[in-house]
Image (spheres, rainbow, N blue to C red):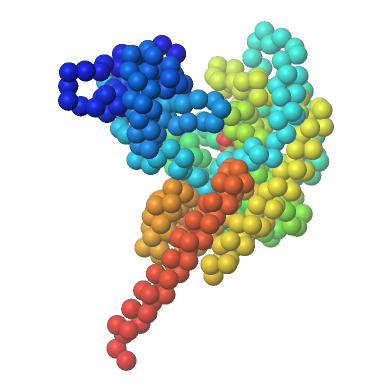
Amino acid sequence: MDLPPLPLDRTSGLPLAVQLADAVRGAAAAGSFRRGDRLPSTRALAATLGVSRTVTAAAYDQLLAEGWIAARHGAGTFVVGAPDAPPGPAATPARPPTAPAGTATTSLEPGSPCTEALDPAAWRRAWRAGADALPALLADDVGLPAYRAAVADQLLRHRGLVTGPDAVLATAGTTAAVAELAALLPRGARVAVEDPGYQRVAAALRRAGTTVLPVPVDDEGLVVDALPDRLDAVYCTPAHQYPLGARLSARRRLALVQRARAGRFLVIEDDYDGELRYDVAPLPLLAALAPDVVAHLGTTSKVLSPTLGVGWLVAPPAVRAGLLVARASGARPAEAGQRVFAAMAAHGDLARHLRRLRRVLGERRAETVAAIRATGHEVRGDAAGGHVVAPLPDAAGEIAVAEALAARSVTVGLLSSYGLTGPTGYGVVVGYAGPDRPALRRGLAALQEALAGATADVTQRAAISHSAQPV
Ligand SMILES: Cc1ncc(COP(=O)(O)O)c(C=O)c1O
């Protein structure tokens, strides 16, 4: 790379190595170096600057220790403590990194797919095959035929839903599909949403001008008896309640569709990770039970990647027609992700991937549950999906665990933040799909320490409050 100016003043009393380190820091803070820029070797830089190699080596050692640069064996030395993007006119100088390079944050937040389970060769094949045909001349309102056929097959084989490609609409993912459905509802429409629940969907509903009405959930999923009257729609995650992890019981499924028919409201079934169960067989979809009142939504976000930006929808004919009218003058799902998904399905790679994903995630779940239970904490949620919940007794416990984890550079979801209007409970929501194995192990070890500390805190608090009781 072209080096930015690194001014050295031989007349100043400051050692040249210190000046050089200052100059590199200054250039990184000003944006002249970007994260990932390769630095010259100490020998080459010494020759360029006309200083001895001891000077450049001492400056690099200092910058390495501070975390501004990192050395990769055999590859060279790279800038790590600088902005990614060119700073705009109002950009502020980058601050020195707080943690040395190598102590990157480990995220155990839920929501990520398990890319480690993805066979890179299959992924590459799908992208290549997706590019075999030139793009269509016009974007397609319903989605590519090959994609819709692959989705119909997937729904039949993995979700027991008998449908055809003509009933499937491609979407840009679940959140986008909920926004499209909400746009069909009258302004101020009353939409019941599970509480705790998926905040992105609640936000999409609010943005569309609907009134979000929180409905409690328990170990049988959405509490159907608690649904308010005069509803326009209900949004729920029957296969695996998000985030608590229960599945909607058979009797509540029946009760929900009966209420929907009687009250003439739409049920939005978010089947975000329905393909991922590791114990009992899934219950029939709401869409199979009552295709007349259920809009079923699926996504590639959990089984492949949210970066594909595609999902699917199977809805009653009137809803489907309304969506297509809106699409005629609005946004349409993009083609690339559909092609990749269809290609993976056509080559049998998707079925292989799903088998492997279930095995890998089943193992990861078992490891995560064992780690949490070993600390004496309970785990909530069915053996499914990519996350579990470990409840904590109160806000103080949740904060203590979050702080203990932050000190170890680990992040998790906090149950209190899933409440639609405020906390409905406390605990950690632990995603085990995203990190690679070593990161998962590191994260779980930190979680164990943090939870063990929380147990001690709770015991101590209980002891204190107990001793404060009059005897
Ligand atoms: C409950 C729930 N629904 C849906 C999704 C996927 O949404 P999208 O398809 O918009 O990525 C997620 C992803 O985290 C989720 O947690």
Q: Residue at x 79, y 37 (%)?
A: 351
Q: Residue furthest top?
A: 137
Any part of residue 111 in sight: yes
Q: How many marks?
A: 0
Residue 362, position as x, y percentages in the image: 70, 52
> In which quarter of the view is residue 343 placed?
top right
Looking at the picture, tell me which residue is in the foreground, 70 or 418.
70
> In which quarter of the view is residue 27 placed?
top left
Looking at the picture, tell me which residue is in the foreground, 269 or 381.
381
Residue 298, position as x, y percentages in the image: 66, 37
Q: Residue at x 68, y 48 (%)?
A: 361
Image quarter where the C terminus lies is bottom left
Q: Residue at x 64, y 37 (%)?
A: 115
Looking at the picture, tell me which residue is in the foreground, 323 or 134.
134
Looking at the picture, tell me which residue is in the foreground, 468 or 76.
76
Image quarter where the N terminus lies is top left
Residue 30, position as x, y percentages in the image: 30, 21
Q: Quadrant holding ligand 1?
A: top right
Residue 13 lies, with reference to residue 299, above or below; the image says above
Residue 87 lies, with reference to residue 297, above or below; the image says above
Query: In the drawing, does residue 68 fall left or right of residue 106?
Result: left
Residue 469 lies, with reference to residue 219, above or below; the image says below
Q: Residue at x 75, y 57 (%)?
A: 280
Residue 74, position as x, y percentages in the image: 56, 27
Any part of residue 226 in sight: no
